[in-house]
Amino acid sequence: MADTDVIIIGAGASGLMCAIEAGKRGRKVLVLDHANKAGKKILMSGGGRCNFTNYSIEPNNYISHNSHFCKSALSRYTQWDFLALIGQYQIPFHERDHGQLFCDESAKDILDMLLAECEKAGVVVQLNTRIDSVERRTDRFHLKTDNGNFICRSLVVATGGLSIPKMGATPLGYKIAEQFGINVLPTNAGLVPFTLQPDDKEKFSALSGIAVPCVVSNNKQSFTENVLFTHRGLSGPAILQISSYWRAGEEVVINLLPQVSLEAELKARRQQKLKNKLKTILESYLPKRLIGVFLPEDLLDLSLQDLSDKQIQRVADRINSWTIKPNGTEGYRTAEVTSGGVDCDAVSSKTMESKQVPGLYFVGEVLDVTGWLGGYNFQWAWSSAWCAGQYC
């Protein structure tokens, strides 16, 4: 039975980062993962370019039952610290909208950097290893696996969430927490496309492939980004963002033309005695296909002079405040993250160690901390893992 200082379950972003930091302190570190390759989610993220952090990281970019929990870690290991590491490896990157940072070439650059740092720190990464059981005896954790049995003083759970099961996501981290009496908050698919009610799906499937800059809101939050119509429902950055704040049965309001107050615009044009058809004016703002689905043909064929105030308001309401009740989401199959998870109230925000089980640590997505779309979840992985790595 192999004895080591630290075992980290999970060779993803947070697991490798924690291993590097613990290894730098002279700790003997073993990373175990059931996958055949380390960092699979890193490699697929950002369309293969890895949106590894964001220029603007704030606690309000995160959702958690304990809104203060993420503050300590994010302030102690910042986006600038990770960028300094990127700089050491001369990884070329670029900025996209809203401060999002991506690799110029490949997400593999990030994974290669992490694995190189692990090697420098003497970390051993063992793949193709399924954890069968975890026990705590006195001050040691005993792990039985299908690839050997292990003992350690510190056990770090870096198993991620339930999103994208085809990449190997499992509930192992939540099960370990529950086994030790640690509360796990209900989980949901986060940053995920919406599916529509059958009638809406039939109606809007004709718009599949159209993307429109919108403001998407519910009673908790609002996002200004593209909305993409798909054959299953609604996707695009604004939908993914609001999905983390949405619960089944709630409505979402979408402003399809946020830069124009349509009611005021149409009334102003009518006053100018313009004879344009409503259709002609709307087509200067929005795709023709979209207008035809959202508004009836007989209304679109009317000239501005023939429109009543009531009709103008109806048009404006439909375009500036389209209210829709999603049928659900596409679920973990396509979700980028998992909302909910290990209760942060049960974990030290300084060390990431369980308050009730000494030597047991939780980092990254397995915790009840969910970032926005745009590099925030990777930064949470780096920050939380760095903190645990100073103590485990």
Image: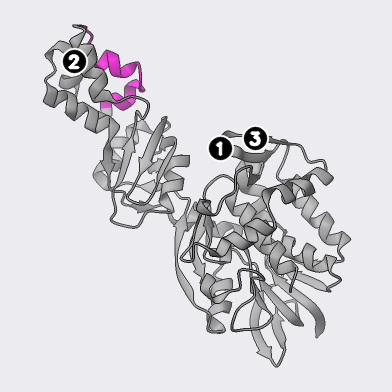
Mark closer to the observer (2, 1): 1
Q: Name the disc covering residue 301, or none.
A: 2
**For the residue carrying disc 1, how many other residues have a C-alpha within 10 Å: few (<14), some (14-19), or many (20+)?**
few
Per the image, label 2 sits on a secondary structure element best described as loop
**Magenta region:** 274-292
Residue 361 drawn at (x, y percent): 65, 74
Residue 201 screen position, x and y as percent: 30, 42
* Magenta span contains residue 284: yes
Quadrant for residue 381, please give it.
bottom right
Left or right, residue 388 beside residue 265: right
Q: Assign a secondary structure to mark 1.
A: helix
Specify the label residue 382 is tagged with: none
Name the kind of residue labelled 3 in the image. Answer: Glu
309 or 162: nearer the viewer: 309
Sequence-earlier tag: 2 or 3: 3
Q: x, y percentage for residue 279?
A: 25, 16
Residue reaching furthest bottom? Answer: 138
The residue at 81%/79% (across/down) is 4
Labelled disc at residue 98 = 1
Using the image as rendered, state which of residue 113 and residue 77 is in the foreground: 77
Asked whether the beta carbons under mark 3 and mark 1 sit within 8 Å of each other, the answer is no
Residue located beneath label 3 in the image? 95
- The image shows residue 305 at horizontal and vertical percentages of 14, 11
Image side of residue 8 versus residue 278, left or right: right
In which quarter of the view is residue 125 placed? bottom right
Cα separation between marks 3 and 1: 8 Å
Q: Is residue 266 above or below residue 276?
A: below
